[in-house]
Amino acid sequence: MSNDKLNFNGLTRRDFLRVGTVGATGVGLAGLGGLSTEALAEANDIGRLPSRRYGRTGLEISAMVGASDWSPDVIPMAVKAGVNYWHKAQKWTKETFPAAIKSQPRESYYLEITVDRVGGDNRTGHIDEEQHYQFVKQAVARSGAGYYDVFKFHYGYHSVQEAKTNPGMVRAYERLKKEGLVKHLAISQHHYNNMGGNLAFEILNYLMENSPYEAAQFFYTYGDRKETQDLIALAKQKDFGTIAMKTMGGVGRAAGDKKFQSLLAEPKFAGSTPAAAMVKWLMANPNLTAAVVATKSFDQLLENIGAAKQPRLAANDRHALDLLAGYNKGLTCLLCADCVTSCPEHIGIADIFRYERYALDYHELDRARAEYKTLTKNGTACIACGDCLPDCKADINILSKLKQVHDLLG
């Protein structure tokens, strides 16, 4: 697709921007000369995303959440479609805060700030109450937003034991809440079994029963492990909010695979795509609050919103998901991290394959290489013992895959 053309009933990219911008700020669509009545009507009829209660926070958030790394060009139309929850909003300053969001009443949208460990990355850094407190205060001042609706501990605890014994992150949140700078507490949880810690679902099962956390974000995609499904169901029972991330495993690389695309052209897939089917699959889970879905273009935004508004899997959608699952077998990691437990070298295999996703599915090679460089043990640490292979639900030849990823990112 060229920079000027968008396959949306004849609207050019520039016209689409104009429609999206005025629509998001509540201004009518009249005055866009040169556009047909039909084109204007369909642009104005993009519809609204469904919303769900974000657990104990009580917030009614859009089923598809936005992120600060979305292109500024797509944000106005996202707002128009009802996206009202914004991940990593601390990246916006007074100067860069999107006008389409800022023009809305402050209580109508929700900003999330992610708070990282200090003195290192998510593996080597530590929790420091005072530094986390100051980070949020400074971010509030830079953004001009007044407050953040959700304080989210980014990457999460290394273990259940750390969650039990280190209250620094919670204390920073409690101080900020008293000052009206944050309102709710959530966590974005990763796996840490390569460090002798716990898997994400083990930590989250503890937190929803024994902590002030109100919601969580975690890896979840089609074909995921039963424990993650059980976690989502239990969270619904406990009124604990859930947001799925890293949801589109294999979708990006399949889109660029000519053989896959030729298979997708068969009549039984007509009217669906793996991306749209994945969004529908996520939305069809009544226990899941929302999902982070990769959105980098108008085409992706329109497809994702259209799918999210129709949370029912038709036969063609199921066929598309089955085709993707077959394509991913032996190729795309589900990020379950089971293999890591068996690795005698304690290599963060799932982390390495997550970085591969950034490169091949999200087309963010620079980001993937930067993340890969932070590892204390990369793909070259593999001693080819094969202990990990029986644990891989995706039937990946992990030994050769680690070498391939190192050649790509090292």
Image: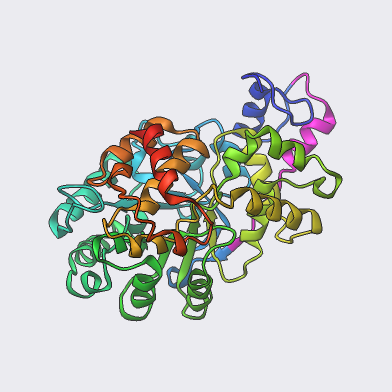
- Figure quadrant of the N terminus: top right
Residue 39, position as x, y percentages in the image: 79, 31
Q: Based on the picture, tell me whether residue 348 belongs to the magenta stretch.
A: no
Q: How is the image coloured?
A: rainbow
| Residue 129 % position (x, y) | 16, 60
Residue 46 screen position, x and y as percent: 71, 43
Which quadrant holds residue 285?
Answer: bottom right
Residue 26 appearing in the image? no
Question: Where 123 sits versus 303, above or below?
Answer: below
Q: Residue 283, how many percent across, how many down?
A: 63, 60
Tell me which residue sits at (31%, 35%) in the image. 370
**Observer-nearest of 192 and 217:** 192
Quarter containing the C terminus: top left
Tell me where the magenta segment starts and ends, as one range: 33-51
* Placement of 232 over or under 361, stated as above or below: below
Residue at 59% from the left image edge and 49% from the top image edge: 328
List the single residue furthest toward the right. 267
Q: Is residue 105 left or right of residue 347?
A: right
Left or right of 215 on screen, residue 161: left
The answer to whether residue 207 shows anywhere in this view is yes
